[in-house]
Amino acid sequence: MMKRVSNDCDIRSDGGSSVSWNVMDDIDSFVDDEEFSNEELVKWIRMLQEEVRHLDNMNEVMKKEVDELKVRVETASTDIIGRSQKSVEVDGHTYRMINTFVVNKVFLLKKFVSSQQQLDDFTSDNSLGKIVMDKMGVEIPDRLPYWSAYKEIAADAIANRRTTITNDMKKVVMSKL
């Protein structure tokens, strides 16, 4: 049977912990108890000290990992913010590619852009912006400035295609009258 030894555990400001044993009081209490020999008590205390060392080592490893993750997140955030602040010039070739793609492929799925919020969205799975940028191979950190430059072109392409189809339907109806 194991008895629990009373101890004081202090947590240091750096996140580590130190265990200070009031060894003499604990030993005296076990000496009075006939269930434990001094040898068993010493083994048990050494085992507990080894466990504390092991936990302190694990704590140090975890602190290093957290520090590395903080650096990576900070670097990634800085990169994304930096890329999002650059402006993208609209060029004719990309304009034609987006227009053709939206008219021929996207229009089959999305016939209306009903709000500015819907047009601005480029992160949702079925958003116009995500569909276009996935097709164009735009990297995630570059998507904000890219979509800001080209979103009106995509919306205009959908509206123009819808208008063309409506006018063609009117011609067919009017020719039958």
Image: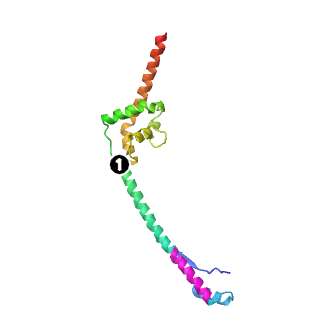
In the rendered image of this protein, does residue 20 appear above or below residue 132?
Answer: below
| Span colored in magenta | 39-54
State the residue at coordinates (38%, 46%): 139
Residue 161, x across and y down, in percent: 42, 26
State the residue at coordinates (45%, 64%): 66
Among the 4 quarters of the image, the one containing residue 154:
top left
In the rendered image of this protein, does residue 62 appear above or below residue 107?
Answer: below
In the rendered image of this protein, does residue 142 appear above or below residue 10?
Answer: above
Q: Please tell me which residue lies in front, 18 or 34.
A: 34
Looking at the rendered image, the quarter that the N terminus falls into is bottom right
State the residue at coordinates (37%, 50%): 81
The answer to whether residue 12 is seen in the rendering is no
- For label 1, the residue is 83
Question: Callout 1: helix, strand or loop?
Answer: helix
Residue 93, x across and y down, in percent: 31, 35
Say if the magenta span includes residue 50: yes
Considering the whole magenta stretch, tell me its main secondary structure: helix
Residue 61, x across and y down, in percent: 46, 69
State the residue at coordinates (46%, 21%): 166
The answer to whether residue 9 is seen in the rendering is yes
Residue 150, x across and y down, in percent: 37, 37
Disc 1 residue type (three-letter): Arg
